[in-house]
Image: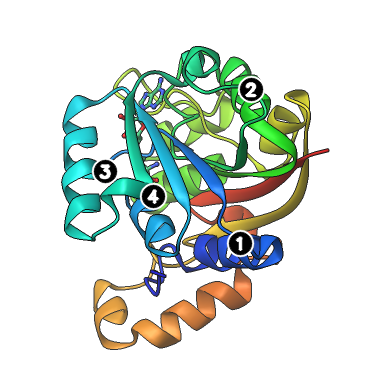
Amino acid sequence: MESSAPRTAVVWQVLRRELARAGRPLTALDVGGGTGGFAVPLAQAGHTVTVVDPSPDALAALTRRAAEAGVGERVSAVQGDGDGLGDLVPPASVDLVLCHSMLEVVDDPQKVVAALAATLRPGGAASVVVASRAAAVLAKAIGGHLAAASLLVASPDGRGDTRDRLRRRYSAETATELLSGGGLTVEEIHGVRVVADLVPGTVAESEPEALQAFELALAGIPPYRDIATQLHLLARKS
Ligand SMILES: C[S@@+](CC[C@H](N)C(=O)[O-])C[C@H]1O[C@@H](n2cnc3c(N)ncnc32)[C@H](O)[C@@H]1O
């Protein structure tokens, strides 16, 4: 299965453990799964994946990618919205739900989390990636944009100015609260891209293995975890 890229290594490390724990082909759902960066490798590993995404272009690219990888029969593309999951996916029918980089842009994250929790079978797991407010504050400040950094600190949702492409950002605590509110128990939290976006670009090219090892070593350790660009949470339905 993919993924040696330092930028996603920790997410794949957690997912691989979850898949090994199950020890059987799983029924997975990737909400906001886009072009299949996670869905296609999961299908290649023998799992069945449904991707729900509102973008017809992304779904067309997903279908092409799955066919080229020879796993078209294990990947379904469904056009739809996270809020409307209940109408698209039967309740308690999924072993693993992915929701990566999507809760920052939806209208109502609480509603989406409740909907994705409802799709899970008891014991099923949710893999959730959200943008970190702390990382965005530091990135703005390091770039010399102190007013923008202050705005992000003060905003109730971790949103910047009106040009901000994200509607909200999280901390480990607020993301845990969001998932708990949907009836999920958070088991693990890791930082994604603790330093990958901070080191000089040449490091990723010249020392990819060292960078990945460094990312993995720091991902679970606060305060490094908490300044990562994104947070990955593995949560379970009891
Ligand atoms: C930043 S991309 C992330 C793609 C993929 N999950 C990943 O991590 O590589 C965000 C995706 O969320 C989708 N999206 C946006 N609003 C959505 C919504 N309300 N419900 C479901 N998906 C949505 C977009 O079409 C896009 O494919």
Above or below for 91 versus 227: above
- In the rendered view, tell whether residue 148 sits above or below residue 198: above
State the CA–CA distance, disc 1 to disc 4: 13 Å
- Please name which of the two marks, 3 or 1, marks the residue nearer to the observer: 1
Q: Please identify, in this view, whether the residue under mark 3 or under mark 2 is nearer the observer.
A: 2
Pointer 3 or 2: first along the chain: 3
Q: Amino acid at mark 2?
A: Pro
Number of dots carrying numbers: 4
Residue under label 3 = 35
**Alpha carbon of mark 4 to alpha carbon of mark 2: how far?**
20 Å
Q: Tell me how far mark 3 sits from mark 2, CA to CA.
A: 25 Å
Is ligand 1 within 8 Å of the beta carbon of the residue shown at mark 3? yes
Query: Relative to 1, does residue 24 appear above or below in the rendering?
Result: above
> Judging from the image, what secondary structure is the residue with disc 1 in?
helix
Identify the residue under disc 2.
91
Q: Amino acid at mark 3?
A: Thr
Mark positioned earlier in the residue sequence (1 or 4): 1
CA–CA distance in space, label 3 to label 1: 21 Å
| Apparent side of residue 16 relative to residue 42 in the rendered image (left or right) | right
Image location of residue 175, percent across then percent down? 66, 36
Q: Residues within 10 Å of mark 3 (few under 14, many from 20)?
A: many
Name the residue type under label 1. Leu
Q: Nearer the viewer, residue 195 or 237?
A: 237
Quarter placement of the N terminus: bottom left
The answer to whether one can see residue 162 in this image is: yes
Residue at left offset 60%, top offset 20%:
115
| Residue nearer the viewer, 23 or 7 | 23
